[in-house]
Every structure is written in C-alpha cells, then in structure tokens.
C-alpha cells in the first residue's frame, strides 16, 4: 500500500502560506543567535517549521538567500540605531564619538548579527541588491554624521571625498574596538559602563607626544 503524503498546506499546520517566510526568518534568527551562520540550512529550517523541504525554496534561493534576508534586517536595525544617535547629538565631535559607542554597543548586543553583516558568511552584496542598499544606508549614516550636510547628493565632490575618508576612519576605529570586545580580547573594567569605556578609547589621541 502506498504511503499517504499530506499536502504541504496540511504540513504547515498553523502557518498560513503567507506567514511561512516570516516563520522561517524567525527560526533562522534563533539559530543565528545560538550557533551563528554555520548552523543555518534550509533543510533544517523546514524541519523546525514543519513544512516540506521544498517549501523554503519558494521564498529563498538557498542558504545565501535567507542569510541575505537576515543580514538586511540586521543592517536596517543597525542603521536605525546609528540614525537615532546622530539625530539626538548636535555637537559634531560628540556625535561622532556617540556613533562610535553605538556601533560597539550594537556588536555587544547582537554579536552574531554583527559577525554576519561584516564577516565572510555574509552573501555577496553584488548578488543581492537589497542587501547592498541596506549596507550602503548604514554607512551613509556615518558619512553624513561627519559632515554638516544631510544628504550626499548635496555635497560637492570634494566634500563627499572628505566625508567618505573621515567616515571610513571613524568606522575602522569603532569596528576594531567592537571586534576586540566581542572576541574577549579587551574587557571593560567592572566599575565602568561600556559606553564610557568605548568613549575613552575613541577619545585617545594617537599622535606621537611632543618631546618635553
């Protein structure tokens, strides 16, 4: 006797077809938080959500597809956090410092997401236009924060070049601190808040001291 196979809509159980993508993404977020990108696979997600192994491929083009979707969401949250800081700190230098602290704080709050969006597991930007746009938007917040111009389109070529280099320098410094912190290479003192610790590092003058 041939085994009866339930149609996919029955296997979905409580999930409406339109909700499957969101459910898969939520499960992917859970795996990412617990195990990192290496723990993700569409087959595993299908088992976890109770759908057929073919179902996830109707929403994503493979593992890179779901990683790209998770990374887009992470970039958007990251950019929103930076945007909120930039909007609430008026003084130029203080704004740059506050953005650096927010950058590190995001890495500490969401280490696996941070590793995904800036690491080797992130899908290629040129294969996922929405992912590239999300990444560019996050960097755009930094670039605008180091200028007095609200939009890159309003900059002269020289202003844009200066803004890019300054944003890249600020990004590099904050990113280095973030990686050292989440990798446990540097640990904030127990009696010091993370933001204060990071701000102290960012404020350090790295120029050579003058001979007395």
Image (cartoon, grey):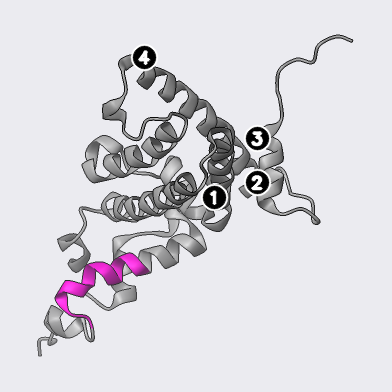
Q: Are marks 3 and 1 in contact (CB under 8 Å)?
A: no
**To which residue does mark 4 refer?**
158
The residue shown at (47%, 44%) is: 86
Residue at (40, 47) in percent of width and height: 79
In the rendered image, the vertical position of residue 198 relative to residue 80, given as above or below: above
**Which of pointers 2 and 4 lies earlier in the amino acid sequence?**
4
Neighbour class for label 3 at 10 Å: few (<14), some, many (≥20)?
some
From the image, tell me which residue sits under label 2. 181
Per the rendering, the mark at residue 186 is none
For the residues bearing labels 2 and 1, Cβ distance under 8 angstroms: yes
Tell me if mark 4 has few (under 14), some (14-19) or many (20+) residues whose alpha carbon lies within 10 angstroms of its own.
few
Q: Mark 4 and mark 1 in contact (Cβ < 8 Å)?
A: no
- Judge by depth and name the residue closer to the eye, 76 or 70: 76
Task: Quote the CA–CA distance across marks 2 and 1.
Answer: 9 Å
Could you say whether the residue bearing mark 1 is in a helix, strand or loop?
helix
Can residue 44 be spotted in the picture?
A: no
Q: Quadrant of the N terminus?
A: bottom left
The residues bearing labels 3 and 1 have C-alpha atoms spaced at a distance of: 16 Å
Task: Identify the residue position indicated by label 3 in the image.
Answer: 202
Which sits earlier in the primary sequence, circle 1 or circle 4? 1
Determine if the magenta segment contains residue 62: no
Q: Quadrant of residue 203?
A: top right
Q: Position of residue 71 (x, y in %)?
A: 36, 51
Whole-angstrom CA distance, mark 3 to mark 2, is 14 Å
In the rendered image, residue 195, in percent from the top left (x then y), is placed at 65, 49
Q: Is residue 91 left or right of residue 30?
A: right
Q: Position of residue 127 (x, y in %)?
A: 23, 39
């Amino acid at each position: 006797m041939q085994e009866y196979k339930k149609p996919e809509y029955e296997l979905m159980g409580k999930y409406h077809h339109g909700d499957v993508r969101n459910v898969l993404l939520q499960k992917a977020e859970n795996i990412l938080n617990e195990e990192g990108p290496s723990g993700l696979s569409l087959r595993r997600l299908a088992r976890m959500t109770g759908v057929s192994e073919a179902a996830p491929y109707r929403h994503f083009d493979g593992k890179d597809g779901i990683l790209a979707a998770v990374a887009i969401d992470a970039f958007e949250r990251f950019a929103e956090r930076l945007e909120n800081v930039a909007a609430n700190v008026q003084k130029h230098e203080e704004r740059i410092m506050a953005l650096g602290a927010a950058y590190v704080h995001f890495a500490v709050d969401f280490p696996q997401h941070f590793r995904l969006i800036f690491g080797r597991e992130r899908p290629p930007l040129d294969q996922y236009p929405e992912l590239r746009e999300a990444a560019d938007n996050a960097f755009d917040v930094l670039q605008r924060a180091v200028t007095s111009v609200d939009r890159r389109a309003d900059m002269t070529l020289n202003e844009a070049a200066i803004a890019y280099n300054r944003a890249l320098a600020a990004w590099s410094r904050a990113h280095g601190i973030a990686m050292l912190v989440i990798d446990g290479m540097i640990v904030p003192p127990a009696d010091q808040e993370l933001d204060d610790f990071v701000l102290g590092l960012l404020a350090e003058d790295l120029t050579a001291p003058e001979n007395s």
